[in-house]
Image (spheres, rainbow, N blue to C red):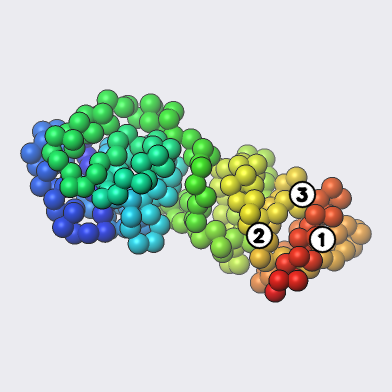
Amino acid sequence: MNVLIVDDEPLARQRLVGLLKNINGYEVCGEAANGNEAIQRAQELKPDIILLDIRMPGIDGLETATHLNNMSKPPAVIFTTAYSDHALQAFETHAVDYLLKPIKQERLEEALQAANRLTRPQLQELKNPNDKDNVRSHICVKIRGTLELIPVEDIRYFMADHKYVTLRTVDHEHLIEESLKSLESEFNHLFTRIHRNALIADQYMTGLEKNNDGHCVVLIKDIDDKLEISRRHLPHVRKKIKTMATYK
């Protein structure tokens, strides 16, 4: 079984490498020092198991695990941490185990064996990318076969079209396989539904106007797109824009 070790502390990674050398059937295929690097390395190396630290700079281990779950063949995740206060959240990401530092070889071996018993289909069945109790700071998108992270704060809007949703930033559009309903549930404190097929970031709504067809559209900061607002949602959108203008 190939194992990827992710920890921002070189000594912690070194210790895990040493422990794994004494456990038959497991081989270190690579290392990563943060969440972004872990996602890239996981795509390149396709490990069976990831030993993942929780507290790291940038995106932490919990959010990293959520993005790893989006892979077509997600690895089994075993969290390694010096803190016990994230145990519940860790298991909500469908982690196989949660190891407290300093990690003992016996506990590591138990966790690896548990991960080994889970087949790829079982892992994929367990891991639903839309099953999130924690709000993400980034959205994972596929660009030319690789996964990249888009900061939520850079997203202007989400627009649904059949089975895909378009994620729009200032410079790019990306297709993601997430439902608009789940995105609204997760980010309802940051985005407002303006139509049955669109969510727009509150902070980038700059005003309203009518288009040539007489329909009301919302103006969006830094881009020329003007999204139509349904009659049902218009009163709420007007109120939201007025409230935001008051606090600016």
Horizontal side, residue 136 vs residue 77: left or right: right
Q: Is residue 45 above or below residue 204?
A: above
Marks 3 & 2, CB-CB < 8 Å contact: no
- The residue indicated by pointer 2 is 201
State the residue at coordinates (35%, 30%): 120
The answer to whether residue 221 shows anywhere in this view is: yes
- SS label for mark 1: helix
Per the image, the residue denoted by label 1 is 238
Q: Amino acid at mark 2?
A: Ala
Q: Is residue 119 above or below residue 222?
A: above
Residue sitting nearer the eye, 50 or 190: 190
Left or right, 118 with respect to 10, comes to right
Crowd tier of the residue under label 1, counting other residues whose Cα lies within 10 Å: few below 14, some 14–19, many 20 or above: some
Residue 213's quadrant in the figure?
bottom right
Residue ID for mark 3: 195
Which residue in the rendered view is the most extreme toward the bottom? 248
Percent of width and height locating residue 193: 72, 51
The amino acid beneath tag 1 is Arg
Residue 82 percent coordinates (x, y): 26, 50
Whichever of callouts 3 and 2 sits on the residue coming sooner in the sequence is: 3
Q: Tell me the quarter of the image containing the C terminus.
A: bottom right
Q: Residue furthest left?
A: 22
**Looking at the picture, does residue 78 appear above or below residue 239?**
above
* Residue 47 in sight here: no
Mark 3 → mark 2, Cα distance in angstroms: 13 Å
- Assign the N terminus to one quadrant of the image: top left
Q: Secondary structure at mark 3?
A: strand
Q: Residue at x 80, y 60 (%)?
A: 239
Q: Residues within 10 Å of mark 3 (few under 14, many from 20)?
A: some
- Distance between mark 2 and mark 1 Cα atoms: 14 Å
Q: What residue type is disc 3 on?
A: His
